[in-house]
Amino acid sequence: IMYLFSRHVSAEVKDLFNIDEKKGEIRLRGKLDYEEMDSYEITVEARDKGWPPLSGHCKVVVEVLDVND
């Protein structure tokens, strides 16, 4: 199984997060600011390596906490 961001995921989200292709682990690449965005919806695709490849999708919601107030 290979995990990847859906093609509908924005470039901004791809700049802030990355996904491990083999494990599906999503990690933060940059800093998040609650004042800019309080949550992110990331659509993830899991695809097998068969022919034709089969895939499934899910939505991951990341909620940002305002820690400086």
Image (cartoon, rainbow, N blue to C red):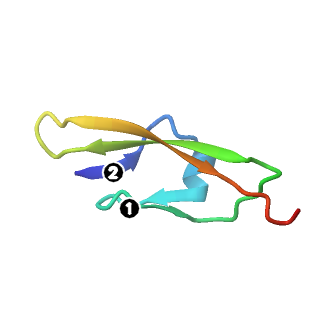
Residue drawn at point x = 78 percent, y = 54 percent:
34
Badge 1: few (under 14), some or many (20 or more) residues near its Cα, within 10 Å? few
> Which image quarter holds the C terminus?
bottom right
- Residue 15 x/y as whole percent: 59, 55
Q: Earlier in the sequence, mark 2 or mark 1?
A: 2
Query: Along the horizontal axis of the image, is 6 left or right of 61?
Result: left
User: Mark number for residue 50?
Assistant: none
Q: Residue beneath label 2, please?
A: 3
Left or right side of 38 for 35: right
> Does 22 sit left or right of 8 as displayed?
left
Q: How many marks?
A: 2
Residue 23 as seen in the image, left or right of residue 9: left
C-beta proximity under 8 Å, tags 2 and 1: yes
Q: Residue furthest left?
A: 51
Q: Position of residue 68 (x, y in %)?
A: 85, 66
For residue 20, which numbered disc appears in the image?
1
Dot 2 surroundings within 10 Å: few (below 14), some, or many (20 or more)?
many
58 or 53, nearer to the observer = 58
The Cα–Cα distance between marks 2 and 1, rounded to whole angstroms, is: 7 Å
Q: Secondary structure at mark 1?
A: loop
Residue 48: image x %, image y %? 19, 45
Residue at x 36% of width, y 42% of height: 45
Task: Depth check: give the residue in front, 16 or 62.
Answer: 62
**Label 1 amino acid?**
Asp
Position of residue 51 measured from the top left corner of the image (x, y, whole percent): 11, 37
